[in-house]
Amino acid sequence: MRIAMIGTGYVGLVSGVCFSDFGHEIVCVDKLTAKVETLRAGGVPIYEPGLDEMLRRNVEAGRLSFTTDLAEAVKGAQAVFIAVGTPTRRGDGHADLTYVYAAARELADVIDPGTVVVTKSTVPVGTNREVARVIAERLVETGRDCPFEVASNPEFLREGAAIEDFMRPDRVVCGVDSEVAEQVMRDIYRPLSLREAPVMITSLESAEIIKYAANAFLATKITFINEIADLCEKVGGDVKAVAKGIGMDGRIGSKFLHAGPGYGGSCFPKDTSALARIGQDHSVPMRIVETVIDVNDRRKRRMVDKVLDLLGGKANGKRIAVLGVTFKPETDDMRDSPSLTIVPALVGGGAKVVVTDPEGRREGEALLPGVTWAEDAYAAAVEADAVVLLTEWNQFRALDLKRMRGGMRGDAFVDLRNVYDPEDVTQAGFRYVSIGRSDAEPTAGAPVTELMPST
Ligand code: UGA
């Protein structure tokens, strides 16, 4: 099937490349000439494991191409996907749909009759019907007779695991309003049926809500375990054991229960905020989601205190090595990363901050003024008073702790991802603080035996 993909951001590019790998003929279109040129030359503007190889393979096979020309891209296409950005609108938390509607309007002039216009961008309830209205309005304006269909096809892939998520999804959700659109969507995803991925057909509205509800639920799950971690720190307990203990209950599930410095990224912060606004607009307050947003924002700020507590309360004059600045490993994405709250606070407090990240430097340099960049963890830690592990890249999971400690002038290790075994770090000569593991804290309470009343 011939398919056009509008937008070569994360979702658009991964989807386009993966669809071409299914065997479909894909034309990706973007307004940014430089980006299209990079893609045409075989370059991939984002860091996503495996994407460059899959892109090259499908370009060579003649199934995947890139253009800035919308008319050329949609000519002969049975389905046109809109995968443009829907950032948070400045000031009010709503999703900004400018690019979605602009694309819809432009499409009205160029699509072939019978095309299914599929929205893949994350959009609030009602957007797909509005897309249909915008296209219909423009068709009336131009006097063009061009029947078309719409469909909603939200994406659930994670950055860093995008190809695996696309190729082996838990489910594919297609919101449709007609049998024709349903058939086209089923044909597009047929290759996945060999892998028994369920294709779920819903109304347009349900599909739109599923996307926001899924992200909000996952953000809630993370925030919940983060609060439980705080409790563990205060009353004694290990959040890893607690997460395991509750996660083994099939109704709860073990995924997304890793306590950390707060969720970030291009999706959870944006989508929770948009869902809260949708609720307010319809007088159905999303009180849980609103609280999650607030708790997560405060959490990122509180992580600074965790670092400072181990440094005697002051950042001034201290040298701090930060390992990892992207919002999670295997991506170069810095959007809403906890590092953007934590690092500037340390720099602002007078610390000399040395950061290292396998992929984050290109984006991070402009976002983190006043820091020094180091090649690796050991170089970052030279003469440091403290090491802060902020993103759990593989490179930081098996550090030679003694070697690192040997190059430092201080002995503080703040592990905001619970990567290390407290005993190993302590044995390497560190004072160690992690998340929700009271036993690991230097100020841990007295052993239980000492607390027993004497008889
Ligand atoms: C998220 C969803 O997981 C995808 O299903 C969805 O398609 C995507 O948003 C989107 O809407 O496009 P992503 O933002 O790439 O994917 O990253 P996640 O792996 O979900 O991580 C998000 C944040 O939560 C990260 O900051 C991560 O460190 C944090 N996290 C995740 C935790 O703190 N604990 C966990 O247990 C899991």
Image: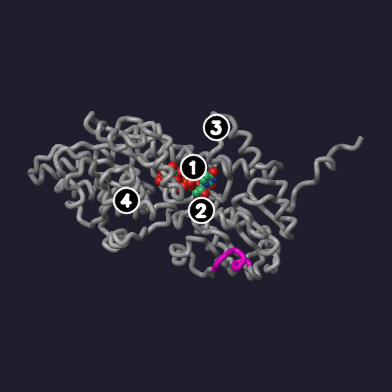
Mark drawn on residue 390: none
Residue 55 pos. (x, y %) = 34, 53
Residue at label 1? 219
Mark 1 Cβ inside 8 Å of ligand 1: yes
**Mark 1 and mark 3: Cα distance apart in space:** 14 Å
Q: Is residue 357 above or below residue 302?
A: below
The residues tagged by marks 4 and 3 sit, at their Cα atoms, a distance apart of 40 Å
Residue 380 covered by magenta stretch: yes
Indicate the quadrant where residue 32 lies.
bottom left
Answer with mark 4 or mark 2, whichever residue precedes in sequence: 4
Q: Position of residue 396 (x, y in %)?
A: 59, 57
Q: Would you name the residue on which mark 3 appears?
A: 252
The residue beneath circle 2 is 329
Q: Nearer the viewer, mark 2 or mark 1?
A: 2
Q: Tell me the magenta residue range.
A: 374-381
- Mark 2, mark 3: which one is toward the viewer? 2
- Label 1 neighbour load within 10 Å: few <14, some 14-19, many 20+: many
What secondary structure prevails in the magenta region? Answer: helix
Among the two numbered marks 4 and 3 on one chain, the one whose residue lies closer to the N terminus? 4
The picture places residue 248, in percent across and down from the top left corner, at: 60, 32
* Crowd band around label 4 with a 10 angstrom C-alpha radius: few (<14), some (14–19), many (20+): many
Q: Is residue 306 visible?
A: no
Name the residue carrying label 4: 58
Number of the front mark, 4 or 3: 4
